Amino acid sequence: MLVEEEKARRQCEELEKAWEVLNGAAAELGSKIVSLPPDVYVSLRGAKSLISLCKSHPKLSELTPRDVDAHEGFCVACCGSDVVARIKCELRNVEDLLILKAMNELGSSYAMRLQQRTMKAWEATKPLGISTS
């Protein structure tokens, strides 16, 4: 169980990097268009507080669905007590909303550049393999 907990904490650190990219993209996009959907900010705030919870909670295995769902977000009640899955859900929601808004407001070229940036952020969050040798 200790290995799984350490793996989850490392994933949360990587997800924080994805959060930073998406937060920056939201700020950039927000400065170029009139307004972003409120869900973008709700999910960003929720993901950031869940990342903090993941990094600071003494035993992630003791988190309950209620502990995770206490953090506001778009994906409340979707992932049980799996804090990593919930963070990913929130960040994917942000990504989808940003790319859709970029496509509608600024065109496909801008949206594709944004998507390329977010894809790079997600590369670092691929599940980490555990070596048995």
Image (cartoon, rainbow, N blue to C red):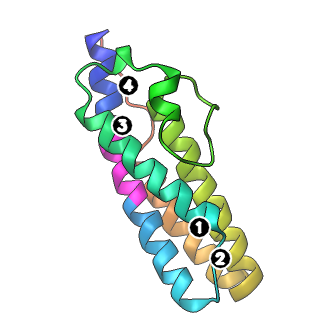
Image marks 2 and 3: residues in contact by CB distance under 8 Å: no
Secondary structure at badge 3 equals: helix
Drawn side of residue 20 relative to residue 30, left or right: left
- N-term mark: 4 or 3: 3
Which secondary structure dominates the residues rendered in magenta?
A: helix
Name the residue located 59 percent from the left edge and 28 percent from the top edge: 79
Q: Secondary structure at mark 1?
A: helix
SS at mark 4? loop
Q: Residues within 10 Å of mark 3 (few under 14, many from 20)?
A: many
Q: Quadrant of residue 114?
A: bottom right
Looking at the picture, tell me which residue is in the foreground, 110 or 66: 66
Sequence order check: which comes first, mark 1 or mark 4? 1
Disc 1 to disc 4, C-alpha distance: 26 Å
- The residue identified by callout 2 is 111
Task: Name the residue: 22% across, 23% down.
Answer: 58
Looking at the picture, how far across and down is residue 8, in whole percent? 35, 28
- Mark 3 or 1, nearer chain start: 3
Residue 42 versus residue 1 in the image, above or below: below
- Residue density around tag 1, few if under 14, some if 14–19, many if 20 or more, within 10 Å: some
* Residue count near mark 2 (Cα–Cα under 10 Å), binned few <14, some 14–19, many ≥20: some
Q: Quickly name the residue at label 1.
A: 115
Q: Which numbered disc, 4 or 3, marks the residue closer to the eye? A: 3
Q: Disc 2 vs disc 1: Cβ atoms closer than 8 Å?
A: yes
User: Which label belongs to residue 11?
Assistant: 3
| Circles 1 and 4 in contact, beta carbons < 8 Å | no
Picture coordinates of residue 52, whole percent (x, y): 30, 43
Q: Which residues are magenta?
A: 11-19
At 40% from the left edge and 41% from the top edge, which residue is drawn? 50
Judged left or right of residue 33, residue 103 is right
Amino acid type, mark 4: Gly
User: How far separated are the C-alphas under marks 4 and 3?
Assistant: 11 Å
